[in-house]
Amino acid sequence: MAPVLSLRGIEKSYGAVAALKGIDLDIERGEVLALCGDNGAGKSSLVRIISGAQEPSAGTILLDGEPVSFRSPQDALAKGIATIYQDLALAPRLSIVQNVFMGAELTRPLLPFLHVLDKRRMEERARGYLSRLSVAVEDMHRPVERLSGGQRQAVAISRALHWNAQVVIMDEPTAALGVKETALVLDLIRKLHAEGRTVVLISHNMADVTAVATRVAILKSGRKVIDRPVAGLDADSLAHMVMTGKEI
Amino acid sequence: MSAAEEAALATHRRIMLQGLVRTVGMLPVLVILCILIHLLTIYVAGEGRFLTAQNLSIVAQQASINTVLAAGMTFVILTGGIDLSVGSILAASAMIAVIASQDFGNLGVPAAMATGLFFGLVNGALIAFVRLPPFIVTLGSLTAVRGIARLLGNDTTVFNPELPFAFIGNGSLVLVPGVIAIPWLAVIAMAVILASWFILRRTVLGVHIYAVGGNADAARLSGIKVWAVLLFVYAVSGLLAGLGGVMSAARLYAANGLQLGQSYELDAIAAVILGGTSFVGGIGSIWGTLIGALIIAVLSNGLILLGVSDIWQFIIKGLVIIGAVALDRFRLQGSART
């Protein structure tokens, strides 16, 4: 079976600066791929290209073996690739339900020509998504700003579930979180993995990577230098590989 | 009942109560204000003059135009914007209503509303497509449309003593002859509130309005056409200002481009803010706006009944607005902590 997402010779330059110098990367269905590298290695550029926020300067993207181009993040989302951004892209003052269904609300017909919001169904479904992720929140109408960092990640992931995203890209999901919340987010990633969804995890935290990732790709100066299974690696050796760009 | 069930029920009750507090909002302030003014009229004049059928009908009438403007303002402020031009648009629309009625009778009504809609669309297009800040755009149209309103009547007052739709401003919908009659102005205001409630709370467009105010970037990322939402809210605000123009013209049989609607935008904004709608966008309700508009109308009416001078009315109204919002802020902070 073709990889869910394949990158072939992806290049990206900003003026004279080449951020990506020909990246080949296959993302297999159902794996948790960690994308690592120092600042400036090209992780963010690569994520922006996969998520549809930017177009590559050269190279092709294959989705299920078919060449695609993402015109925008909405376009990528509609094609099954959801990105959960560092700044979360949630609306903090709006409720859980409103955030989960933003832009894809459920409706029911009131009159033949008039559809109204199906609030009950949205509330039930939102509750369902969160319980699938083993996150217990009573009030689906609570504003997202009153949730903990990990619960917010769960809301963002629920939105990806609602869009039935096959690939979920998570950009530094644990960067601003404490120990307990980090554990919650890692659990969320395991849940997605268990559901058979593909996760691309961008992280600086090698302990997180070894905890949940199945494979790791390390970028250095715009090139992929290492691409290998995580099994058998510990956080220290991984950190060493990110620094040196060489396998141990 | 098991302990777990009881706990669940208790949480459910707490959630219901929180929802109620959020919905009711400033209603207690309105009720207290009504009772206080009524008692004060007894103290000052020897008889209660506020809570009478006749006076309440007057209050409803006085609140109606501001309610209509404030409903449009609620749409705008929910997206995190502001519309300073509603008073001027009201004046221009009222001028069109009277002038058109002189030759075309009732067609003055749609003409005035089309005028309001047009100016609202211009505001919306500048904000949605040219991406200018709402404050700047509507500050500009506050001045420019005021000029247009004066231009329309060559800077004079236009009259139509035979105004065919004058019943809107002066007649009442009689429900029980001799007992219950609701001024048409109040009926229109209520209809506007109900329609706004339906759009904001029951339709996809409504949640998109909240989403744009909640986080425009997130809204855009989830495929919401932010430009369409912005165009819509400013168009609604303009359209309702046009309706306000019709109501105003119908009440006066006349319109004046210079004086009509002066500083109405401030009363509309005050009503929205009193109603608990947040300036940053994404939070608020149309019922709050109705209560806010009623508080302003009750206060004006009560101060007149009590014989308070015009100068002090301004001072008291301003202080009440600040005080009421401060109170609301404290209450919200309190509930957030628990």
Image (cartoon, coloured by chain):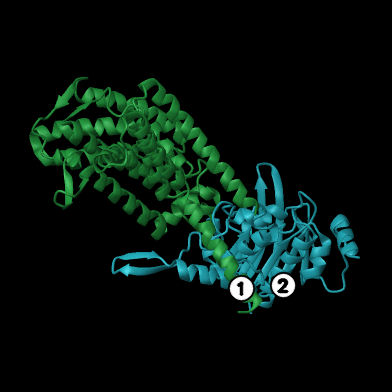
Chain colours: A cyan, B green
What residue is at 18 percent from the left and 22 percent from the top?
B157
| Foreground of the two, B48 or B154 | B48
| Foreground of the two, B160 or B321 | B321
Q: Is residue A166 visible?
A: no
| Foreground of the two, A6 or A128 | A128
Residue B147: where, in percent of width, then height?
A: 29, 23
Q: Which chain carries label 2?
A: A
Q: Nearer the viewer's eye, disc 1 or disc 2?
A: 1
Q: Is residue A13 left or right of residue B192?
A: right
Tell me the crowding category of disc 1: few under 14, some 14 to 19, or many 20 or more residues within 10 angstroms, Cα based. Answer: few
What residue is at 53 percent from the left and 50 percent from the top?
B214
Q: Circle 2 is placed at which residue position? A: A190
Amino acid type for the residue under numbered disc 2: Arg
Q: Circle 1 is placed at which residue position? A: B6
The residues bearing labels 1 and 2 have C-alpha atoms spaced at a distance of 33 Å
Q: Mark 1 lies on which chain?
A: B
Q: Residue B98 carries which label?
A: none
Q: In which quarter of the image is residue B121?
A: top left
Q: Which quadrant, please, contains the C terminus of chain A?
A: bottom right
Q: In this view, does B225 lie above or below B112?
A: below
- Mark 2 falls on what kind of element? helix
Residue A236: where, in percent of width, then height?
A: 90, 62
**CB under 8 Å between discs 1 and 2:** no
Residue B287: where, in percent of width, then height?
A: 40, 50
Q: Quadrant of residue A3?
A: bottom right
Q: Is residue B319 left or right of residue B146?
A: right
Q: Can residue A83 be seen in this view?
A: yes
